[in-house]
Image: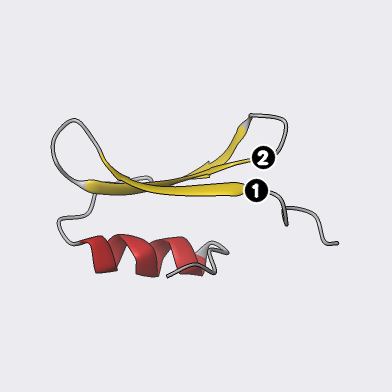
């Protein structure tokens, strides 16, 4: 198993209604997050994929 295989990815709307992603390690520490909010969920997912996300 490679490092990060057990990380949890979250795609969510922030308090301003913009889409963001966050990657949390199995020890509970946030190891990655979107640096900006996105108007469209697809744009957020595309950014997450550039950072290792392999989900929908």
Which quadrant of the rendered structure holds the N terminus? bottom right
Q: Give the CA separation, mark 2 to mark 1.
A: 4 Å
Image quarter where the C terminus lies is bottom left
Residue at 27 percent of width and 66 percent of height:
43
x then y, percent, for residue 5? 73, 57
Which residue corresponds to the image point at 71% horizontal and 50% vertical from the top-left? 6
Position of residue 33 in the picture relative to residue 54 (left or right): left
Q: Is residue 8 above or below residue 43?
A: above
Q: How many marks?
A: 2
Q: Which residue is mark 1?
A: 7
Q: Is residue 25 left or right of residue 19?
A: right
Question: What colour-coding does the image apply?
Answer: secondary structure
In the picture provided, is 9 more to the left or to the right than 26?
left
Task: Please rate how many residues cluster around mark 1, counting C-alpha atoms within 10 Å: few if below 14, some from 14 to 19, many from 20.
Answer: some
Label 2, residues with CA under 10 Å away: few <14, some 14-19, many ≥20? some
Residue 24 quadrant: top right
Q: Position of residue 31 (x, y in %)?
A: 61, 40
Q: Quadrant of residue 47?
A: bottom left
Residue at 24%, 61% in the rendered image:
41
Residue 15 in percent (x, y) is at: 19, 30
Looking at the image, is mark 2 or mark 1 earlier in the sequence?
1
Task: Return the residue at label 2.
Answer: 25
Q: Secondary structure at mark 1?
A: loop
Name the residue rendered at 58%, 64% in the picture. 52
Task: Please identify the quarter of the rendering in which residue 29 is found.
Answer: top right
Residue projecting furthest to the right:
1
For this view, does 36 lie left or right of residue 56? left
**Residue 49 in the image: above or below residue 39:** below
Check if mark 2's residue and mark 1's residue have beta carbons within 8 Å: yes
Per the image, label 2 sits on a secondary structure element best described as loop
Name the mark on residue 39: none
């Amino acid at each position: 198993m490679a490092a990060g295989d057990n990380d949890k990815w979250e795609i969510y709307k922030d308090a301003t209604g913009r889409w963001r992603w966050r990657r949390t390690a199995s020890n509970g520490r946030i190891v990655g997050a979107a640096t900006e909010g996105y108007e469209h969920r697809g744009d957020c997912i595309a950014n997450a994929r550039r950072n290792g996300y392999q989900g929908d």
